[in-house]
Amino acid sequence: MNSTVYVLTCLTTLLCAVLLLKGYAQSRRKLLLWSGLCFAVLTISNGLVFADLVVYRSIDLFTYRLVAEALAMVLLLYGLIWESQ
Amino acid sequence: MTPLSPMTHPLLDIFLLGFITACSLASAIFFLRFWRSSKDPLFLAFVLFFVVQIFRESYTVSLTRPNVGALWLFLLRFVAVLAILAAIVRKNFWDRR
Amino acid sequence: MTEETPNSGIDPYRFILENVDSIPHLEALILLWNSRPVGWTADELASRLYVPKEQVAHVIRDLVRLQVAQEQPGPPVRYSYFPRSEEQNETMQLVDNAYRRDLVRISTMVHSKASSSVREFARAFRFRKDRDS
């Protein structure tokens, strides 16, 4: 049950990343680039949750999860502040 | 069931949780503005996503084992993610005209 | 919004609302339409429209994507109106008429739209790109 939640969350953020990066390829709007990268890194972070809590239970990946999330937020904020006029 | 290892960098982790909370707050406000100017409910879904993130990250600080989290916290994020999915589906498959 | 929709049923205001992201977009479009089939370089467009070159590049890219402008290979590369169909030509004529007649209303309409980056963000989540929103 837990695994399903993690995996589905992962797939959705992946979908957002793909759509946004595709949109960037077409329109070249930087906002889409940075938010697409944000969701790509969030996907990695969600994947790390799965790895941390389900697969590698003896190692603590919490800090890496948080670093990934923090990085994702920085990417997003950069795009939001610079590009949204 | 093997227990999870304890947290390795508690101070850094708490700092990061706060950092993510603050960034999520800023993002939520941006998406709120986008929703106001475009009237597109997709942006409202993102607002919800980041508001949930604010709540999750700050609540996690109070847990005795933050690195485990709690299932209901993950479910909360999942609900926010479902909101985004619903907005995407509505945008593409619900013909309003 | 449609006080006088001509027989063909084309509404220039709706076209502008759905496809024109900013005033420079609109003015570039009108310019290309009125000067067709003359081609303009990006620099010429920038100085004629009084917008910076980077912004003009965005405008040109969007107009080409909308298939109302086409690239004429260089050197130097020029852009001209793209007469895709009779229907589009008719729409352009109506847009031009509306622009001459109703500038204030059209500018207000265009200005009140969300910024084009935001609209592109929303558009990215559409699987079929033929409709706006």
Image (cartoon, rainbow, N blue to C red):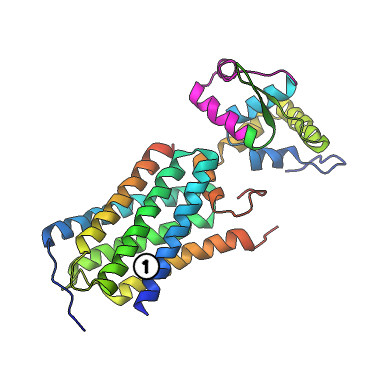
Badge 1 amino acid: Arg
Above or below residue C26? Residue A58 is below
Q: Is residue C115 visible?
A: no
Q: As drawn, is C9 to the left or to the right of B79?
A: right
Left or right placement of residue B33 versus residue C29 in this view: left
* Residue C98 % position (x, y): 74, 31
Which of the 4 quarters of the picture holds residue B90? bottom right
Q: Which segment did they paint magenta?
A: C37-63
Q: Which residue is mark 1?
A: B77
Local crowd size for mark 1, using a 10 Å CA cut-off: few (<14), some (14–19), many (≥20): many
Q: Secondary structure at mark 1?
A: helix
- Residue drawn at point x = 76 percent, y = 41 percent: C11
Q: Is residue A68 visible?
A: yes
Residue most extreme to the bottom: B1
With respect to residue C67, does B86 lie above or below? below
Q: Position of residue B41 (x, y in %)?
A: 52, 57
Residue at (64% x, 40% y) in the render:
C19
